[in-house]
Image (spheres, grey):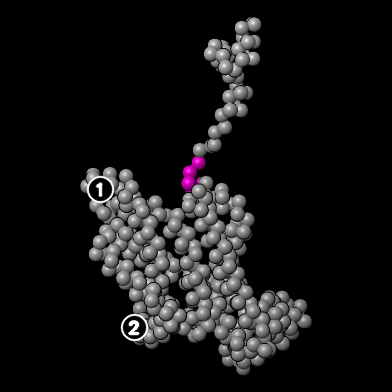
């Protein structure tokens, strides 16, 4: 005992203290070993995304607006194109025109006085006697659909061009990137307006008798504008990711095994870029919605009588002094959608971009 005590008192002693080799107890092991539970990249990103309260609230707002745009027109008693004062075989009832929110026409008020039930006009009616609430809801549906499909077109073209340019390199990369530089040098706003104007006149006759006639020449021209001008940012982003990934060991191993370039791109490179692709697409959707809105505001958007948020705001300019809420309501909806999508896209980027979280 005295020798052991001397060892403890003298730290410079070369004798071994056997007490240091006593096996640790279970409680000591639990204290020393703190292992993180196994997880995946996706689960880890979702957990960080949920902790971001701003992004989570924005996602909830987007989901609510989308569900309303899809399901409200199914059970709403008024149609977006129905003029309520127009009854076949009877003169037009002008009391349905320009109703204010929660206001009833003379005919509807008479029904209410007689004890009948009349569904209210939450946002009133427009100058043609159409229920304004359902037109705003349907316009939101059109704007969301145009933004989603336009972003999908941009995504497909950007992935194809960017992956080919980044993987093949050489002359192909130089040619594709010079095309991207040329498109970047064009004034966006002017080119969008010019292309939308020219394509609308061309497609008016070309779509006659085709399944796309119901969609309208203006929406088709919008998709073509996005396919021509808005894929360059996505292509550059994908190219940069491919350039950094094509020198990885698993790509070199696949090349050594004789795998084709298209197979390597599909199986190795694009799956490793998926987080960047999702984030960029989420940020592209509000840009597409905003572009559709201002084109519709200028009269180059969706075809009448089909509404969009931009065309509703444009129509509201005629009675701005008397009915300002007709401009304020679609403007608020556009702002809410674009802001929520941008905040959610920023949250996705913070959650899934490993460079920002490293």
183 or 272: nearer the viewer = 183
Picture quarter with the N terminus: top right
Which residues fall within the magenta stretch?
Answer: 39-43
Left or right of residue 338: residue 273: left
Placement of 200 over or under 180, stated as above or below: below
Determine the residue positioned at 59% across, 52% down: 50
Q: Earlier in the sequence, mark 2 or mark 1?
A: 2
Mark 2 and mark 1 residues within 8 Å of each other at the beta carbon: no
Q: Residue at x 32, y 64 (%)?
A: 161
Rendering coords of residue 277 (x, y %): 43, 59
Q: Residue furthest bottom?
A: 91
Of 231 and 227, which appears nearest the observer? 231
Q: Specify whether residue 298 is in view.
A: yes
Q: Which disc, if any, is residue 284?
A: none
Q: Residues within 10 Å of mark 2 (few under 14, many from 20)?
A: few
Please say if 26 is above or below 298: above
- Residue 314 shown left or right of residue 258 in the figure: right
Count of residue discs:
2
Asked if residue 289 is positioned above or below residue 37 in the image, the reply reads below
Which residue is identified by label 1? 255
Q: Mark 2 sits on what residue?
A: 206
């Amino acid at each position: 005992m005295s020798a052991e005590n001397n060892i403890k008192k003298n730290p410079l002693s070369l004798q071994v203290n056997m007490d240091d080799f006593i096996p640790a107890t279970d409680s000591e092991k639990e204290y020393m070993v703190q292992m993180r539970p196994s997880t995946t990249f996706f689960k880890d990103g979702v957990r960080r995304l949920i902790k971001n309260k701003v992004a989570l609230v924005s996602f909830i707002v987007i989901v609510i607006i989308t569900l309303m745009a899809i399901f409200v027109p199914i059970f709403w008693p008024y149609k977006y194109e129905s003029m309520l004062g127009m009854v076949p075989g009877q003169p037009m009832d002008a009391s349905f025109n320009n109703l204010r929110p929660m206001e009833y026409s003379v005919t509807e008020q008479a029904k209410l006085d007689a004890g009948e039930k009349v569904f209210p006009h939450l946002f009133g009616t427009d100058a043609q006697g159409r229920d304004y609430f359902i037109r705003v809801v349907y316009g939101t549906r059109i704007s969301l659909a145009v933004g989603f499909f336009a972003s999908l077109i941009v995504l497909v073209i950007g992935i194809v061009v960017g992956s080919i340019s980044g993987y093949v390199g050489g002359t192909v990369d130089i040619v594709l990137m010079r095309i991207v530089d040329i498109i970047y040098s064009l004034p966006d706003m002017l080119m969008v307006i010019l292309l939308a104007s020219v394509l609308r006149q061309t497609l008016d006759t070309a779509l006659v008798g085709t399944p796309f006639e119901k969609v309208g020449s203006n929406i088709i021209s919008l998709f073509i504008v996005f396919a021509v001008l808005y894929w360059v940012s996505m292509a550059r982003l994908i190219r940069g990711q491919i350039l950094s990934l094509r020198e990885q060991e698993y790509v070199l191993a696949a090349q050594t095994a004789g795998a084709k370039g298209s197979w390597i791109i599909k199986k190795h490179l694009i799956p490793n870029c998926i987080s960047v692709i999702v984030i960029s697409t989420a940020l592209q959707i509000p840009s597409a919605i905003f572009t559709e809105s201002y084109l519709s505001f200028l009269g180059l958007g969706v075809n009448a009588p089909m509404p969009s948020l931009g065309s509703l705001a444009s129509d509201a300019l005629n009675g701005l002094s008397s009915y300002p809420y007709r401009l304020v309501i679609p403007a608020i909806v556009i702002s809410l959608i674009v802001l929520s999508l941008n905040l959610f896209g920023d949250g996705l980027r913070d959650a899934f971009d490993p460079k920002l979280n490293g």
